[in-house]
Image (spheres, rainbow, N blue to C red):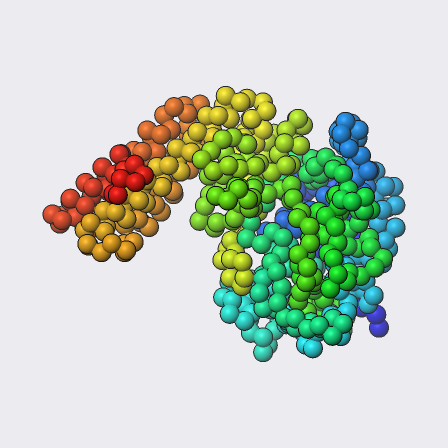
């Protein structure tokens, strides 16, 4: 019996409507998008990838993919005024690819490569597919699983982790795959691995999808734009990767991994999976429109890495497009959406990972509805907000330096970090966010540096209070306070 899990009509995408959760398929999601408040997919790397897939489909349904410049903007405004997607356009698009959205189709399973069943000597295991399970040397997150007794994943959830792997998969060792007599067992990292991703929000899911599609850009080399499921051919793993065309190639075609899910007898769950390399050649750069880019010392650009210990407000300056000590480029989508009458909320997804196997923490958050388009609407306030974030970072950096220096003075061990800096920084950053939002709310930007500095001195006292009665510690604490107020200039040797 042929197994099937049709993502067009089977429920697999969690949404919320008026506070009530629902699970829908792709067709229902687009037809009823204006009724839903938001996506509520609980796995942030899967949600981040799914938004990109939905943006690409949105561009197809609305015709935005074929327009540019003022015509693109006019079309976007016209569809937004309609208040919903045209059900006939939704049906026409999905009916064009009736067999391309089946998770277990034997010939063209969605976003998978059916050839892995013969090109890989053995599967990778379902635990390799699911990020929050241990596999190989990775740690246990939310449950205890072993490869010897792997628990099947419901098909709907397997679709989430399929997306997460394609966008956030690890580099390095992977399952062996042999193509045309060439055998390799290593892969490069997924296009979003270890990054932050930012997505503007509207009043409902329909608006969020519409404002999340950036303006059209020229197609690379005149190539027709295709999403993976729109292509008639399977990729050539030893050939040139698919071009970075707009929007499908950029938003959905950058995966560096090939995946194949193995269903159970009923087609309701995934019992095993192949996860391996997809391409041997590097491929064209894909400038993702939802990430912050920073410039390194050599003048190159890199995507803002996710840090599970770093609160979202600390990167507000980058979202505003303001100036800072580090040259940054705000996400392209922020500029594109600036002229729309949105309340300014932005959802951020982060996955704190290293380049290879270590997955530390994933998270998501939403900015308050005041910040992200201040640069266009109120540049004076935007400059004040940006200055606040820089002041907080400056004091936080000085605090760590001061406490590390004071500890080394106390212990006379030059290369030891000591416990004070970690305790002081934890105290400072846990309270700095409240100071930031109070200053923003009251419009008292000039008071920011003074208040952050006051908090920094309180952090010094907190970090050293358990030893503060010792005479040598008193001197070290004084050094820390002095360095916090008057840090040494570069090259001074202190």
Q: How far from the left and from the top, in percent, is residue 305?
A: 52, 48
Query: 108 or 171, which lies in front?
Result: 171
Q: How far from the left and from the top, in percent, is residue 30?
A: 77, 44
Q: How far from the left and from the top, in percent, is residue 175?
A: 64, 71
Residue at 72%, 52% in the rendered image = 253
Residue at 63%, 53% in the rendered image = 191
Quarter of the view holding residue 163: bottom right
**For residue 110, side relative to residue 186 (left or right):** right
Above or below, 117 against 21 in this view is: below
Above or below, 360 against 474 in this view is: below
Above or below, 287 against 237 in this view is: above
Residue at 80%, 49% in the rendered image = 226
Above or below, 375 against 37 in this view is: above
Screen quadrant of the C terminus: top left
Quarter of the view holding residue 187: bottom right
Q: How far from the left and from the top, in percent, is residue 242?
A: 75, 54
């Amino acid at each position: 019996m042929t197994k099937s899990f049709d993502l067009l009509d089977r429920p697999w995408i969690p949404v919320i409507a008026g506070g009530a959760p629902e699970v829908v398929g792709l067709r229902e999601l687009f037809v009823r998008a204006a009724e839903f408040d938001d996506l509520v997919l609980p796995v942030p790397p899967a949600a981040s990838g799914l938004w990109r897939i939905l943006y690409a489909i949105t561009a197809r349904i609305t015709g935005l993919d074929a327009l540019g410049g003022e015509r693109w903007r006019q079309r976007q405004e016209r569809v937004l005024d309609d208040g919903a997607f045209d059900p006939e356009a939704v049906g026409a698009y999905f009916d064009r690819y009736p067999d391309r959205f089946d998770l277990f189709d034997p010939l063209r399973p969605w976003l998978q490569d059916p050839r892995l069943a013969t090109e890989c000597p053995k599967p990778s295991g379902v635990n390799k597919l699911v990020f929050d399970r241990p596999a190989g040397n990775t740690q246990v997150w939310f449950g205890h699983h072993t490869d010897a007794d792997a628990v099947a994943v419901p098909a709907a959830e397997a679709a989430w982790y399929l997306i997460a792997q394609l966008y956030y998969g690890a580099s390095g060792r992977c399952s062996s795959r042999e193509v045309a007599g060439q055998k390799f067992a290593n892969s490069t990292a997924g296009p979003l691995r270890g990054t932050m991703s930012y997505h503007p929000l509207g009043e409902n899911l329909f608006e969020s999808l519409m404002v999340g599609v950036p303006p059209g850009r020229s197609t690379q080399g005149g190539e027709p734009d295709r999403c993976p499921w729109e292509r008639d051919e399977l990729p050539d793993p030893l050939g040139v990767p698919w071009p970075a065309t707009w929007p499908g190639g950029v938003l959905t075609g950058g995966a560096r991994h090939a995946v194949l899910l193995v269903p159970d007898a009923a087609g309701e769950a995934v019992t095993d999976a192949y996860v391996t390399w997809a391409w041997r050649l590097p491929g064209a750069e894909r400038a993702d429109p939802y990430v912050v880019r920073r410039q390194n010392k050599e003048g190159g650009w890199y995507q803002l890495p996710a840090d599970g210990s770093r609160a979202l407000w600390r990167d507000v300056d980058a979202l505003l497009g303001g100036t800072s000590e580090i040259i940054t480029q705000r996400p392209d989508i922020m500029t594109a959406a600036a002229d729309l009458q949105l309340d300014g909320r932005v959802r951020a997804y982060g996955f704190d990972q290293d380049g290879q196997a270590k997955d530390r923490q994933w998270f998501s958050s939403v900015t308050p509805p005041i910040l992200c388009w201040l640069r266009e609407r109120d540049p004076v306030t935007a400059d004040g907000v940006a200055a606040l974030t820089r002041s907080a970072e400056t004091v936080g950096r000085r605090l760590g330096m001061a406490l590390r220096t004071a500890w080394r003075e106390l212990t006379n061990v030059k290369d030891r970090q000591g416990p004070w800096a970690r305790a002081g920084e934890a105290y400072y950053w846990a309270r700095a966010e409240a100071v930031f939002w109070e200053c923003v709310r009251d419009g008292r930007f000039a008071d920011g540096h003074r208040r952050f500095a006051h908090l920094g001195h309180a952090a010094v006292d907190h970090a050293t209070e358990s030893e503060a009665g010792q005479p040598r510690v008193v001197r070290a604490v004084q050094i820390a306070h002095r360095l916090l107020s008057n840090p040494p200039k570069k090259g001074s040797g202190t």
